[in-house]
Amino acid sequence: MRISDNPIAAKLKDLGVELRAAVPLTGKTSLGIGGTTDELLLRRYETIPDVIRLLADAGIPHKFLGGGTNVLVADGELPWVILHLPSAHPGVRIEGNIAHVDASADLGGMVTFCAKNNLGGMEGLIGVPGSVGGALRMNAGAYGTQIGSYVREVELYRASSGQIETVRGRDIRFDYRHTSFAPDDVMLRVKLELPSKPYAEILAGIKICNEKRRSSQPLNQKSAGCIFKNPQGGSAGRMIDELGLKGHRSGGAMVSDRHANFFVNAGGATCVDMLRLIDDVRERVRGAYGVVLENEVIVWKN
Ligand code: EPU
């Protein structure tokens, strides 16, 4: 979608929004898949309600793109613009055991920054790619750690009210890869309460998680992490592996030969390739195990 010729472009500029025309989302997603659209960079959170109102009045659909590490985006010309909050480095301020974190901060960078300030607990999250906001929304987790356990407060843009609101951690439900946030809530800032731990101890934990991850996941291939959620009491990766599907392909999309729940872009994969592979594998698992795997990856169809 192109909006540079739309009268809205000047109004957005007045709000300090930077418009980048015709951005290929192949370069903005960890899968390297996605069509083209205009991107709006929102440098100040406070402008979000006004920006969204302007877009809505002009009938321009939008989506917020965070780190782009858990999303599968449609191919071709996209019928919505992308909004993006540029990341601040490190985007973290420490006050005692509380870390005040921008949602646009890099998750791994945030974990490391807190570690250097002797705040631990999140060692398992170190290799999870993406932004803090994306991790929050999905309640990202690995190696026994889930980000939701540490959340004391979240500041968010609530699309249903058109306002920026503050929600207490105890009023948010954090389940396995799921939260009570509405799909169109936009994470802005979070307060995390973290246990004190000496840096050296945290570093040792981080090292162990990094090694486990390196030995089992295809870290240097383009992927969105695990494609499916694990079914209750089971492992999607193990089931797909048992069916001999490692290396199974649809066009440029391939089941990783390292971890069967990672589907990688093995070269020139399109969204259509990836969706075909997802459906094909889901169907085979259903046939063999009677289990319908649920997507973990978020799909943005046209
Ligand atoms: N397994 C296989 N073959 C495979 C992959 C796994 O047999 O190809 C077996 C493993 O040997 C193990 C079991 O399946 O016995 C579970 O595998 P693993 O320890 O790799 O964990 P997972 O359940 O596949 C989950 C998360 C990962 C997270 C790891 C480590 C989900 C869907 N995945 O994977 O998160 O990194 O645990 O904690 O919950 C993600 O969310 O994108 C993600 C990668």
Image (cartoon, rainbow, N blue to C red):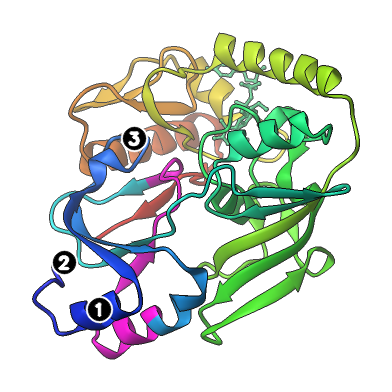
Mark 1 belongs to which amino acid? Ile
Q: Is mark 1 within 8 Å of ligand 1?
A: no
Q: Between disc 2 and disc 1, whose residue precedes? A: 2
Q: Does the residue labelled 2 lie within 8 Å of ligand 1?
A: no
Q: Between disc 3 and disc 1, whose residue precedes? A: 3
Task: From this view, report whether residue 250 is shown above or below residue 161.
Answer: above
Q: Nearer the viewer, residue 51 or 144?
A: 51
Checking the image for residue 60, the label placed there is: 1
Q: Between disc 2 and disc 3, whose residue precedes? A: 2
Q: Which quadrant of the frame does ligand 1 lie within? A: top right
Question: Which residue matches tag 3?
Answer: 31
Q: Which residue is drawn at 81% across and 48% down?
A: 149
Q: Where is residue 208 in the image (x, y as percent from the top left)?
A: 73, 13
Question: Which residue matches tag 2?
Answer: 1
- Magenta residues span 51-71
Q: In which quarter of the image is the C terminus?
A: bottom left
Q: Position of residue 81 (x, y in %)?
A: 26, 66
Gap between marks 3 and 1 measured at Cα: 26 Å
Q: Which residue is drawn at 54% across and 43% down?
A: 89
Which is more foreground, mark 2 or mark 3?
2
